[in-house]
Image: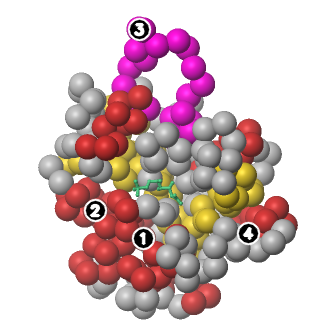
Amino acid sequence: MSLPIRIHVFPDADGLTHHAARTLREACARNAEGRVAVALSGGATPALLYRRLAEDYLHEIPWGRLEVFFGDERSVPPHHPDSNYGLALRELLSKVPIQPEQVHRMPAGESDLELAAECYEHEIQRLVPPGPLGDPAFDLVWLGVGDDGHTASLFPGTAALSRTESLVVANDVPRLGTRRMTFTFTLINAARRVQFLVRGRKKAAIVERVLGPPRDDAPPSEPLPAGRVRPSHGTLEWLLDREAAAGIADPGLIA
Ligand code: 6PG
C-alpha cells in the first residue's frame, strides 16, 4: 500500500531546487555516518538543482558519504553533450569534494547494452542496501518527466515498462530512434524517497494528465510511465513550480 503522493508547488524554480537540496541534506543527516545512495536524472530541471547544490550546498552536504548513481543514460560517450553523466559532472560533480569512485556512471555507450545494464545492476546490488522488499533501496531518487509522460528512460509503449524482473535494463526507444539504459519501476519503487522535479508551462498538461483526476470524456487508458512511479514503502513528492502546477486544481496530497 503506497503512501499518499505529496505535491509541493513553489513560486519558482528557486524554491523547488532549495527544497530538493534540503531533502538530500536531510537524507544525509538521517543516515548518521552511513553511506547515502542517490540517483540523478537528466533534464533541464534537474540541471538547475545540480547548479543549486554546487553553489549553495557545497558545505551543507557530506559529499564524501554519497554513492551517486544515474537513473538513466543515453547511448553516448560520457562527455557527449547529451550525456546525463556529463551534465551532472559539469554542473555538480566537478565542483564538490566527491571522489571518482563514489560516482557510478551508467555505461550506456557500450555495444552490448543488456550486459552493461546487468553489470550496473550488480554494482547497485553491491553498494545499495536492500529495503523491505529485498530490492536495493536508494535513499533518494530524482526524476524528471517528459512531455509524453516518460520518466528516466521509461518511455510510453517501450519494452522496459514491463521488465519488472530486472532493476536496470537496456531500452529501445523507436520514437527517438535510439537505445537507452534505465532503472526499471521495480528499482525506482523500492526507493525510500522519490522526487519529481518539474517546472514550466510546457509541463502543465502532462502534470495534469499524470496527477489530475481521470477526465470523464477520456477512454480508460494505461497509466503514463511517470504515473507508475509509486514507491511501495517510500515517499513520493512532486516538486512543481506554479506554471507546471497550473492544471492541478487542489495540490496538496493525492491518495
Ligand atoms: C533523460 C531524462 C528525462 C528527463 C525528462 C525531463 O535522460 O531524458 O532522464 O527523463 O528527466 O525528459 O527533462 P526536462 O526537465 O529537461 O524537461
Query: Quick one: label 3, few (<14), some, or many (20+) residues within 10 Å?
Result: few
Magenta residue check for 239: no
Asked whether mark 1 and ligand 1 are closer than 8 Å, the reply comes as: no
Q: Are marks 1 and 3 in contact (CB under 8 Å)?
A: no
Element on which disc 1 rests: helix
**124, 215: nearer the viewer:** 215
Number of disc labels: 4
- In 3D space, how far apart are the residues under numbered discs 1 and 3 (Cα atoms)? 44 Å
Report the amino acid beneath label 3.
Answer: Asp
- In 3D space, how far apart are the residues under numbered discs 3 and 2 (Cα atoms)? 35 Å
Camera-side mark, 1 or 2:
2
Q: From this view, report whether residue 5 is shown above or below residue 111.
A: above
What predominant SS class does the magenta segment belong to?
loop
- In 3D space, how far apart are the residues under numbered discs 1 and 4 (Cα atoms)? 23 Å
Q: Going from the N terminus, do you reach mark 3 or mark 4 first?
A: 4
- In 3D space, how far apart are the residues under numbered discs 1 and 2 (Cα atoms)? 17 Å
- For image coordinates 72% across by 53% down, the residue present is 171
Quadrant of the frame with the C terminus:
top left
Q: Going from the N terminus, do you reach mark 4 or mark 2 first?
A: 2
Q: Are marks 3 and 2 in contact (CB under 8 Å)?
A: no
Residue bearing the label numbered 4:
120
Q: Quadrant of residue 63?
A: bottom left
- In 3D space, how far apart are the residues under numbered discs 4 and 2 (Cα atoms)? 28 Å
- For the record, the magenta segment spans 210-228
Query: Quick one: label 1, few (<14), some, or many (20+) residues within 10 Å?
Result: many
Q: Going from the N terminus, do you reach mark 1 or mark 4 first?
A: 1
User: Which residue appears farthest toward the left when viewing the image?
Assistant: 11
